[in-house]
């Protein structure tokens, strides 16, 4: 079976989220509690003349699955867009129907130096 | 009943006060609240009798304005003569006449006794550069210090709130119109609100302490080093670099806590000294700051302002500074040093905005996936630890914590503080009330 993770809508005013950090290699087995992605949400629509209202979140897997696809750091995704694909077996074809959303927890996190927006900052 | 609205007294001994026509913020017929700013005019002082006095008040403050508010509620009736339009509403074409009627008010039924004298909110702005002359609006332009004081008092001390700002302080203090109007409307006691922006140095405790303690010789060393780096470095400085450097050096040269203030009041010119209260924010603290490798001073620059620098400054920041991690213990030490240092010279009390430490957008069911210490990763744990540290500071020093965390929780953080820093107008009003209460308790 396939499972997907969509960009969560973390604020009513949020349109998109930026993939800041991606953890885990494709086609690897992930344990419960594995880090998946760090994302940032900029309520100023990612272009702000002033101090931007940015929040940072980490998505952590809450079940054991095979990682089959993961959005790359620097990718901006709309809320509801797929950002990761999983399967419960390593050889499941990835073009089949998705059974359900993967179970994750969402945690607000501090900004850190491995984030995409930090590494590309002037 | 229709009440003529009179300007009321303003006195500056040795000077003639001139004013522009009135810029009306409310239209003819509008229902206005008591204490609501309904218009403003620009003000200038000219030496009386043609002579030059020894000291020109407001010499550093190129913006000087007076905002007008009725003392009772009612429907506004504008007089034709109160406005001339164009540049004549910018320049001081009228002498200040306390009996001048600029409008009328059809009093609301529940309005109390009133002689029609307007409440005056004085506004003054010290420009970052004389080039930043925006001529229209309340407190227009780019200021390294903006302030407003209620010209209600006829002498005596004025409770002064100095806010050294970052985003979560600017709204509650300066308000929706950025001109202290909400604070003025709410606070009927004599007061002055001063706002110093974080251009470009974020006012963390370390930077504020160093700023307060910095000697002229230490400043000259910083200035010489910086100018040498820009003129002798390998990266050619651009206009962005020079603008950034000028602003940075202004910030590093003097502490706003040592500022003094001219006050134009109904009884004459007053001189205000050290603030009654200094408002700072825990949001200004950074877990990493830049420390100059040779001179040892600290800079904390928000990314949005760091990005305003040109290539030469960015190269200087990268080569001359070392990023240094700051623990909560470091921050606590710097808060205590700052508070003790300022307390030794002034009676100013620190008011500190704490941080929101919860979020409705999280669903952390277990901390197992997160490395210890949790505060290094999880924003809300870090905020809770910061708030606890501030409580420790408050337990050992005479400071007031403005509990943003509790206010956000009561109002609903998701709606009123979506990113944990930038508040809604409702939340700014709540924080403003708590700041004013703390200010007047301190002043008593």
Image (tube, coloured by chain):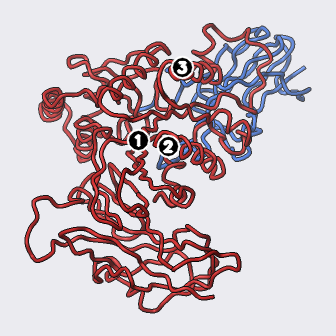
Chain colours: A blue, B red
In the image, B397 versus A112, the foreground residue is: B397
Find disc 3 in the rendering and name its residue: B395
Circles 3 and 1: CB atoms closer than 8 Å: no
Residue B429 locus on image (x, y percent):
61, 51
Residue B302 lies in quadrant = top left
Asked if both marks, 3 and 1, belong to the same chain, the answer given is yes
Measured from the top left, where is residue B336 in percent x and y?
A: 41, 20
For this view, does B390 lie left or right of residue B266? Answer: right
Which residue corresponds to the image point at 76% horizontal and 19% vertical from the top-left?
A68
Mark pair 1, 2: CA separation: 7 Å
**Outermost residue, left direction?**
B51
Q: Which residue is mark 1?
A: B276
Query: In the rendered structure, which disc, 1 or 2, sits on the residue that comes first in sequence?
Result: 1
Left or right: where does residue A121 sit relative to residue B104? left
Answer few, some or many: residues within 10 Å of disc 1's Cα (few below 14, many 20 plus, some between 14 and 19). many
Q: Are marks 2 and 3 in contact (CB under 8 Å)?
A: no
Closer to the camera in the image, A22 or B50 = B50
Q: Residues within 10 Å of mark 3 (few under 14, many from 20)?
A: few
Indicate the chain on which mark 3 is placed: B
The label number, if any, that marks residue B439 in the structure image:
2
Marks 2 and 3, Cα distance to the nearest angstrom? 19 Å
Q: Which structural element holds mark 1? A: loop
Residue at 48% from the left image edge and 42% from the top image edge = B444
Chain under label 2? B
Point out residue B405 in the picture as x, y percentages from the top left corner: 65, 32
Disc 2 secondary structure class:
helix
Q: Quadrant of the N terminus of chain B?
A: bottom right
């Amino acid at each position: 079976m396939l499972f997907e993770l969509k960009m969560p809508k973390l604020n009513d005013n949020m349109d998109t989220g930026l993939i800041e950090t991606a953890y885990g290699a494709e086609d690897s087995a992930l344990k419960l509690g594995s880090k998946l992605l760090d994302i940032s949400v900029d309520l100023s629509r990612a272009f702000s003349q002033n101090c931007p209202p940015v929040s940072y979140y980490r998505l952590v897997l809450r079940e054991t699955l095979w990682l089959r696809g993961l959005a790359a750091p620097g990718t901006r995704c709309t809320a509801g867009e797929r950002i990761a694909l999983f399967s419960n077996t390593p050889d499941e074809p990835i073009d089949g129907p998705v059974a359900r959303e993967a179970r994750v927890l969402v945690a607000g996190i501090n900004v850190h130096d491995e984030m995409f927006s930090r590494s590309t900052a002037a | 009943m229709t009440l003529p609205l009179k300007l009321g007294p303003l006195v500056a001994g040795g000077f003639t006060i001139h004013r522009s026509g009135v810029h009306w913020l409310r239209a003819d017929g509008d229902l206005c609240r008591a204490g609501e700013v309904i218009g403003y005019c620009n003000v200038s002082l000219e030496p009386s009798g043609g002579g030059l006095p020894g000291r020109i008040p407001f010499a550093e403050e190129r913006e000087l304005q007076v905002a007008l508010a009725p003392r009772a509620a009612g429907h506004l009736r504008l007089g034709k003569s109160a406005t001339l339009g164009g540049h004549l509403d910018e320049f001081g074409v009228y002498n200040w006449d306390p009996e001048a009627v600029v409008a009328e008010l059809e009093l609301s039924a529940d309005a109390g006794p009133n002689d029609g004298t307007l409440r005056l909110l004085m506004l003054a702005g010290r420009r970052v550069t004389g080039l930043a002359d925006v001529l229209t609006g309340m407190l227009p332009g780019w200021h390294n210090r903006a302030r407003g004081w209620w010209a209600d008092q006829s002498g005596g001390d004025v409770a002064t709130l100095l806010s050294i700002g970052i985003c979560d302080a600017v709204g509650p203090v300066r308000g929706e119109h950025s001109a202290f109007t909400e604070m003025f409307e709410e606070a009927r006691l004599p007061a002055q609100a001063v706002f110093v922006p974080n251009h470009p140095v974020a006012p963390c405790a370390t930077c504020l302490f160093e700023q307060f303690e910095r000697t002229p010789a230490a400043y000259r060393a910083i200035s010489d080093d910086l100018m040498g780096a820009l003129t002798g470095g390998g990266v050619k400085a651009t206009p962005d670099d020079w603008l950034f450097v000028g602003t940075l050096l202004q910030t590093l040269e003097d502490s706003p806590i040592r500022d003094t203030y001219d006050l134009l009041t109904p009884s004459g010119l007053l001189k205000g000294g050290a603030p009654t209260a200094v408002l700072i924010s825990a949001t200004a603290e950074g877990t990493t700051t830049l420390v100059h490798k040779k001179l040892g001073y600290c800079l904390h620059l928000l990314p949005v302002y760091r990005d305003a620098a040109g290539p030469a400054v960015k190269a200087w920041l990268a080569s001359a500074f070392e990023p240094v991690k700051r623990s909560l213990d470091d921050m606590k030490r710097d808060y205590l040093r700052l508070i003790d240092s300022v307390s030794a010279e002034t009676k100013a009390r620190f008011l500190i905005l704490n941080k929101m430490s919860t979020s409705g957008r999280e669903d952390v069911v277990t901390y197992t996936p997160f490395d210890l210490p949790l505060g290094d990763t999880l924003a809300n744990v870090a905020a809770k630890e910061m708030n606890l540290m501030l409580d420790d500071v408050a337990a050992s020093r005479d400071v007031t914590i403005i509990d943003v965390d509790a206010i956000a929780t009561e109002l609903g953080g998701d709606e009123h503080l979506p990113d944990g820093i930038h508040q809604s107008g409702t939340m700014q009003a709540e924080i403003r009330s708590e700041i004013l209460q703390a200010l007047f308790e301190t002043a008593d």
